[in-house]
Image (cartoon, coloured by chain):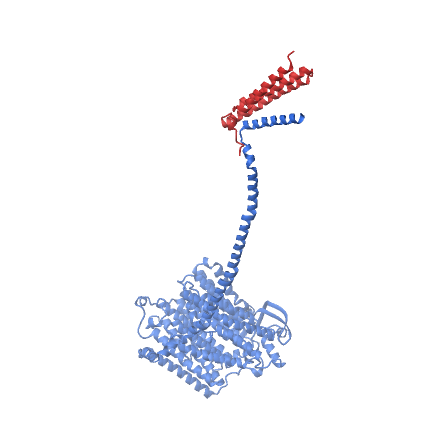
Amino acid sequence: MTPSGYFLDHVWLVPLFPLFTAALMLLAGRRLRNGAVSALCVGSVAASFVFAAGAVLQLVAADPAQRVKQMILFAWVPAGPMHTAAGRLVDFVADWGVLLDPLSSVMVLVVTGVGLLIHIYSIGYMGHEGGYYRFFGYMNLFMFSMLTLVLANNLLLLFVGWEGVGLCSYLLIGFYFLRRSAADAGKKAFIVNRVGDTGFLLGVFLLVATLGTVRFTSAGLPVPSAYSGIAQALAAGIESHALAAGAPVLTAIALLLFVGATGKSAQLPLYVWLPDAMEGPTPVSALIHAATMVTAGVYMVARMNALYQLAPLALEVVAVVGAATAIFAATLGLAQNDIKRVLAYSTISQLGYMFLALGVGAFAAGIFHLMTHAFFKALLFLGSGSVIHAVSGEQDMRKMGALWSRIPTTAKTFLIAALAIAGIPPLAGFVSKDEILGKAFEHSPLLWLVGFVTAGLTAFYMFRLVNMTFFGTSRVDPEAARHIHESPRSMTMPLVILAALSVIGGWIGWPVALGGVNRFERFLEPVTRGATPETAAEGVAHHTMAGGYALMAVSVGIALAGIWLAYAFYIRRRELPGRVAASWPRLYRLLYRKYYVDEVYDAMFVNRTKDLGTALGAFDAGVVDGLGVDGAGWLTRATSRLSIWWDTWIVDGLVNVVGRAVRALSYPVRWVQTGVVSSYALFIVLGIVLGIVLLGYRLH
Amino acid sequence: MIPIGHYLFLSLALFIIGVIGVLTRRNVIIILMSIELILNAVNINLVAFARLFGDVAGQVFAIFIITDAAAEAAVGLGIIIAFFRNRETVLSDEMDMLKW
């Protein structure tokens, strides 16, 4: 018996509200006034939020074992019978359907909730910008795509949303398309994502060939046994020994799908697009490049956890890539001066944490961190937008400082977010990050160490940012300094709400070690259970109390150390950063130039691709245009010259020869035709005389 | 009875005068008049021989020629007038528009 209720039965409407307004904006938005645009676009997201929240409440009201609702709206790709690689005949169909289970509940609430707050914030932030309707049209199109992604009941439909958010990301990064850097950043994001999506699509193909279905699960449908599902197909495969845990094909699928995740979620080695994506408007950075879209990879891996749990090698790769990305991006964040770029590297680093969690099998912890990160990173981005707004568009932290009392609401909420991401208890970031570190320690102390060091680096660069922006002495341009002002209510209100969520958002997953019950993990447990009991993720936290306390203590300790170090460096002894940079100039340059990754990529891939383009262009110009087109032209001219010669000298020549001959022959006759009538008469008379003489001669 | 030789001589004289007129004069009206002389030379021949042989057919033929001459004069003078209107001349050596 699947749960039901008004909102649950209408959960398929959730993506459609923003789709409707997006279509309206992009088709007829130019004619609407800004007030109407705001009301419609924010209203549609609010409607989505209400329907999503209602549906989730009705889902939670059901018995934990029954908390899954799946609806098939229509058969989208009814491909018909096909053979899997194993030779089994299956009826392949990808439907347009909705799956609401604990995992997608969390995602849909994060997307619509944080999305709604960012939409409200955008009313103030984008109020003075041109293309207001275009901005909201793209944002609502993004909401539709993202909600399609998280509510999809199969991998193919998820891919539709996946590409949709990629498109909206491209459109919104390049929102100020007259600025060359913005247009280039949009292209970079799109192209780097194509690399990942190639892997994703190959993974989907391999999955279809192996299992013959793309539907995540058949649970939640009226007659589950009548439908296929990945989870069920995997379980059946294990049971019949057609598939084994760790089978190469499963590892290959998992790794290919993960390639897609590294593109979308900006992990090594495909993270390069995210820092450049900061060219877009700040609400876009908050919504797409911090809270929702970039977490799609995390969601996808968590959604496919049944597969990943059967591919331990792939999970190991996920964990290592996540940990490496976390520490790699955190070191990059140390030496950046653009406030949004610091946050971008921080996002990459935090996404690495999430993948670390997924990789060690703690799917719930990864999703938990995804949620809390959405709160405090959206807050950080929106706060940085408010700061940028206050200092007349300046993004360089070296030209900020001492803004604490000038923009108090922004500053206080920003500080809360910074404390949350640094992992100070009892804020949200502490709970979720510690959950990950604890799980990582159980899996491998080395991975834990990487995450642990990253936590310290995170605290350091976040408070470097806070100190450079809000404390110390003001380095704001005198011109901009006169205009510093707190942002309007529509911008500060979302900040306050997000700050509250950054504080309390972690409490639903309060760890058992600190006397909680970790409701969040229990809530997600039906989804993260895996295909078969033997391969299931480790259950609800069971590490020893003492060990748990010790881990928490050291991670809080390193966070405090990071904060203290930032305080020492950027407030008390401000000459220190310069001296440190001077003592290790090469290290500093390496960090400042972001490990030269962009340069290496340029040298290895971008310029080689351009070279290929140049070569193909030369081929086009030389062979296709030169030999083909110009050659054909030359040949035509040559043959036409020949036929001109033939026409002139043979055809016309013959005509002229005939004419000349006739003229030459007629030349003597011409003399007779004098045109003088008398001479004709004379000829007549002479002729008659001659005739008579001849006649007489004959008669005679 | 006047012998036939006189008639023939008169006729020959008229004919030769006519031919010389046609060949030597430039004025088309004079040429037309010369042609009338030639026709009348023929008429004299016809009438003379008709009287000599007692056959009335020659006289009938002469009547036909007189009629024909009248028609010819009418058409010829018409052409000359039309031509004069266009070229303001009646001289035959200036009528050379068909010459190539």
Q: Position of residue A49 (x, y in %)?
A: 49, 69
Q: Nearer the viewer, residue A300 or B51?
A: B51
Question: In this image, A268 relative to A249: left or right?
Answer: left
Q: Position of residue A212 (x, y in %)?
A: 61, 73
Q: Position of residue A517 (x, y in %)?
A: 49, 82
Residue A668: quarter of image: top right
Residue B87 in view in this figure? yes
Question: In this image, A681 relative to A420: left or right?
Answer: right
Seen in the picture, residue A84 relative to B94 is either above or below; the reply is below
Seen in the picture, residue A497 relative to B18 is either above or below; the reply is below
Q: Residue at x 50, y 74 (%)?
A: A261
Quadrant of the drawing holding the C terminus of chain A: top right
Seen in the picture, residue A219 relative to A666 is either above or below; the reply is below
Q: Nearer the viewer, residue B26 or A342?
A: B26
Q: Position of residue A35 (x, y in %)?
A: 43, 61
Quadrant of the drawing holding the N terminus of chain A: bottom right
| Chain depicted in red | B
Q: Residue at x 51, y 27 (%)?
A: B93
Chain A color in figure: blue
Q: Nearer the viewer, residue A279 or A528?
A: A279
